[in-house]
Amino acid sequence: MINPFIKFKGLEFFGTYEVAQGRTITEKSLRQTTQYAADLIYRFPAKQNFWVAVRYNAVVGTMKGATNDVTINRMVGSVGWFITKNIMLKAEYVNQQYKNFAKTDIRSGGQFDGIVVQASVGF
């Protein structure tokens, strides 16, 4: 796993590259799953309590008994506001797609395309 983080003034980049291998007790060979992610965030003004961001995340891997790799892609655009140090409000536009799953799998052809609004209080 590699997780680079770069910050210049209000602009931040955070990335992820991860590879995992494994198998069930009945499988002879290892399966592999790879995850890629990138976050680009701009925080403003001087207090940096507002932000605009984009995020891309993809997972590619082989399911047990499958011959093709399956893929899950997620693209997010967000705006947010730290109302106080522990209260946050954000709105996101999300597009998530499930590709190459077996026709009998509930995730086959699945997708989400919409707006999510969230608020949180943290201590």
Image: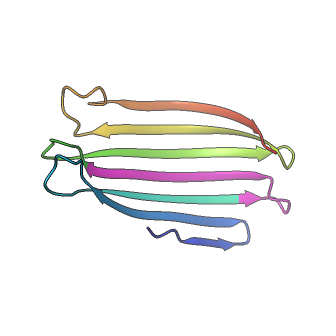
Residue 7 vs residue 42, the one in the foreground: 7
| Left/right of residue 108 with respect to residue 48 in the rendered view | left
| Image vertical order of residue 83 relative to residue 34, above or below | above
Question: Quadrant where the N terminus lies?
Answer: bottom left
Count of numbered tags: 0
Q: Is-magenta flag for residue 117?
A: no
Magenta stretch: dominant secondary structure: strand
Within the image, what quadrant is residue 83 found in? top right
Within the image, what quadrant is residue 87 found in? top right
Q: Position of residue 10 (x, y in %)?
A: 72, 66
Q: Position of residue 32 (x, y in %)?
A: 26, 57
Residue reaching furthest to the front: 25
Q: Position of residue 118 (x, y in %)?
A: 68, 34
What's the magenta region? 43-61
Q: In the image, what residue occupies the spot 13% across and 54% down?
A: 28
Within the image, what quadrant is residue 107 found in? top left
Q: In the image, what residue occupies the spot 36% across and 38% down?
A: 97
Q: In the image, what residue occupies the spot 49% across and 60% down?
A: 38
Residue 76 vs residue 118, the one in the foreground: 118
Q: Position of residue 2 (x, y in %)?
A: 46, 70
| Left/right of residue 109 with respect to residue 93 in the rendered view | left
Q: Is-magenta flag for residue 45?
A: yes
Question: Quadrant where the C terminus lies?
Answer: top right
